[in-house]
Amino acid sequence: MATSAAPASPHPHALFLPYPAQGHVIPFMELAHRFLDRGFAASFVNTRFNHRRVVAAAAGATTAYSSEGGGRLRLVAVDDGIDDAGDHENLILLNAAMQEAIPPQLEALLDGEDATGEGLGKVTCVVVDSGMSWALDVVRRRGLPSAALWPASAAVLSVLVKAKRLIRDGVIDDDGAPVNLENNSFHLNESATSMDATFLAWNYMGNRDAERLVFHYLTSTAQAAAAKADFLLCNTFSDIEPAVFAGPTPATILPIGPLRTWQRPTRHAPVGHFWHADDAACMSFLDAQPRGSVVYVAFGSISIMTAAQLQELALGLEASGRPFLWVVRPEQAGKLPDGFADAIDGLAKGKVVGWAPQEQVLGHPAVGCFVTHCGWNSTLEGIRNGLSMLCWPYFTDQFTNQTYICDIWRVGLRVASAEGGGLVMKERVVELLDRIFEDEGAKERVLRLKEMAEKNMSEEGESLNNLNVLMESMGR
């Protein structure tokens, strides 16, 4: 049966499909806002599980979703293939289920068969997550321009794209396990500079079966993205990863970062958070603190600490004598010492919140140090705000980013020992905070990186130019 044509639209219409994890949704929303600024309409597709979280987290600002971009942004939910009662945060299950469930729904969206009735017209171009590159087959069958965005470092993306070469050269085996590393490092090719073993990011999960599955998923999707998308994008800038972009065989990756959108006239523009951020409580606490004095502590959306470790960190922050703002997700808050949050809040020297508006926090002049899990978004946000970092990675490429921060850029310190394991005691927390606040060299180096980041997104910057080229091509 023939379907009626979707209404014509005066705007090019971009569809965005991020991988269903917080660290992917936020940069995708930032990129969507860039397209909106350029006059595009945008459909932002989340799994139904995450769609509900994003809308709920926006709370009273939900009207911004329909008004943002002059009514040209719509949020769309698709089923991820897992029953409502199932585990929608088990990434191994998701990777298998989504490939079957989402493509038919995507076909309906691309053909204009959505039920939103918002009059945005047919989709004219698509940006998918590199980890969702199996969706590109649907896009290519319709002849639409496409891009794939990798929201982590270009170095790890390069390793994933070239994994077959590493297998051929005997650096890793067929399942990604390291086989032949010299001094715990390897080369992508004979003329490339050496890379630390942490750039084989999938090997840092603590479970070999999971590492094998993640290796095959990430390499297959990254290689498909490189082969099938018209543009392979990365939320990075070439100055912080020169080995990738300035080597003898530069990558075919287009750096378009660091992306940022919170500093825009529409104060309540949707940013894709899964939890409600208590903006007022965070900012009022920071406003009352001296410049450069506050320790901001946040470990992202997935990291988990044992109760014993969380309590040592709490005691260390308290013993440091420094004001601190600490993000403890609701499911972790029960591990804190009894009465801790209320006690330190009463002293006005510390504050514990369930979620925070991280970019605003990091941009506040009172913040002087960032204790981080080293997710790529957090890493870039620390750099963009010129902050030294204490690194406490949890898994995968967070260890890669720690290598960048501590060994290559030299703008931070490791919290845990290289061997890992064992409890990080409160005394070490105090010692490291003293060291990072007193390290003027690290402060100078991170300010230079901040200048590079700002230059890349300025009118003459490489990343902004790449973004303009992308949007011009996608808007034709």
Image (cartoon, helix red, strand yellow):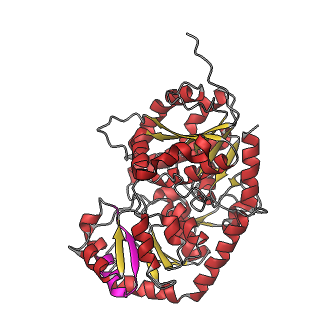
Where 316 sits versus 106, above or below? below
Tally of numbered discs: 0
Asked whether 220 or 184 is in front, the reply is 220
Where residue 275 appears, x then y in whole percent?
A: 39, 55
**Bounds of the magenta span?**
312-329
Q: Residue at x 69, y 73 (%)?
A: 451
Which image quarter: residue 12? top right
Nearest the camera: 348 or 444? Answer: 348
- Specify whether 343 is left or right of 414: left
Queried whether the magenta region covers residue 313, the answer comes back as: yes
Q: Is residue 399 visible?
A: no
Q: Nearer the viewer, residue 313 or 172?
A: 313
* Picture coordinates of residue 425, whole percent (x, y): 32, 81
Quarter of the image that includes the N terminus? top right
Q: Is residue 225 visible?
A: yes
Where is residue 308? Give x, y as percent. 26, 72
Taking the view exactly as shown, the residue that stands out farthest to the left is 338
Indicate the quadrant where residue 229 lies. Answer: top right
Q: Residue furthest right?
A: 460
In the current view of this chain or complex, which residue is farthest to the top? 1
Identify the residue at horizontal 58%, vertical 65% (top origin). 380
Residue 388 found in image quarter = bottom right
303 inside magenta stretch: no
Indicate the quadrant containing the C terminus: top left, top right, bottom left or bottom right.
Answer: top right
